[in-house]
Amino acid sequence: MEQSLEIIQTAMNLEKDGREYYQTAAEKTKDPKGKDFFLMLAKDEEEHMALFTTIYRSLKEKGTWGSLPAGQLTKRKVQSTSIFDKKEAGETKADVGDIKAVEIAIGKEKNAIDFFSQSIDKVDEKDAKALLKELVEIEEGHLNLLKGELSALSDSGFWYDFQEFTVEGM
C-alpha cells in the first residue's frame, strides 16, 4: 500500500503542477482561443487532481483504491485546425511566448505519460492498472493536441508531424 500512496501523491503533485502551469499560461497568452485552450487543459488536470485526492483518502482510510471511474474521465480529440488564431497574411508569426508555453506544456505532458506508464507495473490492483492506462491515453491526447498547436504556431509546414504541402502537390 505504501507504493500506491507514493504513486498517488506524486500523481497529485504532477496534476497540481500541470493545472497551475496551464492557468498561468492562459493568463499570459495573448490569443483568446489560446487562453481557452490552456484553461481547458487546466480543467482536465483539476479533474485528475480530484480523482487522485479521492483515491488517496480511500487508500489511507480503507486500504483500497476504492471505486474508480474508468472510462469516465474527459478525453480530448485532436482537432483539425489550430485553436490559436491563424495570423492574417502579411502579419507576423505567432507570439514567441505562446510557442514557448506550448513547448513547455509538451514537456510536462511527456513527464506525466512516463510517470503513469511506469506506475502501471508498480500496482497490483486490476482497476488501478486500468485507470493508470486510461490516464496515459488522456495525457497522450493532451500531448497530441499540443504538438498540433506547436506545428500550427511555428508555421513549419507540418501538422501533427505530417507535411501539410509539397512542391509536387501544388
Image: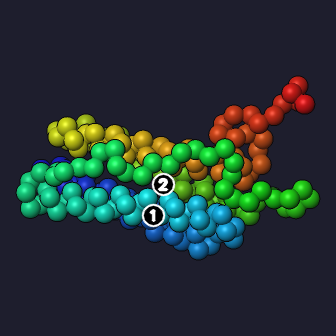
The colour scheme applied to this rendered structure is: rainbow
Depth check: 154 or 31 in front?
Answer: 31
Q: Residue at x 47, y 43 (%)?
A: 140
Where is residue 124 drawn, in percent x and y? 16, 38
Where is residue 141 drawn, in percent x and y? 50, 45
Q: Label 2 crowding class (10 Å Cα cut-off): few <14, some 14-19, many 20+?
A: some
In the image as oriented, which residue stretches furthest toward the top?
A: 168
**What's the residue type where badge 1 is placed?**
Lys
Q: Residue at x 37, y 60 (%)?
A: 47
Q: Mark 2 points at which residue?
A: 108
Instruction: Name the mark nearer the viewer: 1 or 2.
Output: 1
Q: Label 1 crowding class (10 Å Cα cut-off): few <14, some 14-19, many 20+?
A: some
Q: Compared with residue 66, is residue 137 higher up or lower down, i.e. above or below?
A: above
**What's the residue type where badge 2 is placed?**
Lys
Q: Residue 43 carries which label?
A: 1
Q: In this image, 107 relative to 85: left or right? A: left
